[in-house]
Image (spheres, helix red, strand yellow):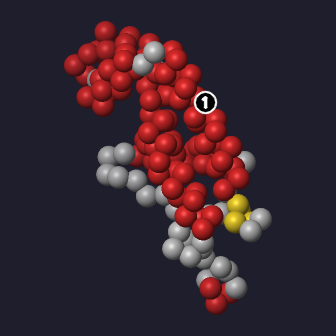
Amino acid sequence: MMRSGIEIVSRDNHDAAAELERALAGDFVEQCPGITAYEMKWPHQQYAARHGALIEQRVHDRMAQAQAMKPADYTARLATRTAMCKKARTLMRVDGLPLGLQLIGAAGKDGTLCAHAHWLMRQSGA
């Protein structure tokens, strides 16, 4: 690709790419599951009441996280996510050109990986 005149940037050779990676690896990863847990609190409670033993442990863990959250916690997470979205939109371009990303997820974390990809697509206007 480089022979064709395509410049490949990464965190190792471009400050903006490194900054974007740091932004995505930090608060984004921590904030979004909590937001989703809180938003799904009531449907998950209904599922557990009807089919408790059939619900994955991951869902039970998210329910516990949501139970511990107060509305103010949720509001704070939303504000953090909004700030992160604004920053990501700025960082999704390198020298005025769109930035390409490859996302790789951990085994058994397809839902999280797809959520991250969906969020990135929305932020970039794709």
**Nearest the eye: 14 or 66:** 14
Residue that sits furthest to the bottom in the current view: 3
| In the image, residue 5 above or below residue 126 | below
Q: Residue at x 54, y 51 (%)?
A: 23
Give the percent coordinates (x, y) of residue 90: 71, 53
Percent x, y of residue 69: 42, 19
Mark 1, Cα crowd under 10 Å, few <14 / some 14-19 / many 20+, is few
Image quarter in which the N terminus is found? bottom right
Q: Residue furthest right?
A: 96
Q: Say above or below: 121 vs 95.
A: above
At horizontal 70% and vertical 61% (from top left) the residue drawn is: 93
Q: Provide the residue designation for mark 1.
A: 79
Residue 124 point in image, percent of width and height = 69, 50
Q: Position of residue 18 (x, y in %)?
A: 55, 64
Can I make out residue 126 in this image? Answer: no
Check disc 1 and report its element: helix, strand or loop.
Answer: helix
Residue 30 placement, left or right of 11: left
Kindly give the residue lying farthest to the left in the view shown.
Answer: 53
Q: Is residue 75 left or right of residue 89?
A: left
Tell me if residue 115 can be seen: yes
The structure residue drawn at horizontal position 60% and vertical position 76%, both measured from the top left corner, is: 8
> What amino acid type should be assigned to the residue bearing mark 1?
Ala
Number of numbered labels in the structure image: 1
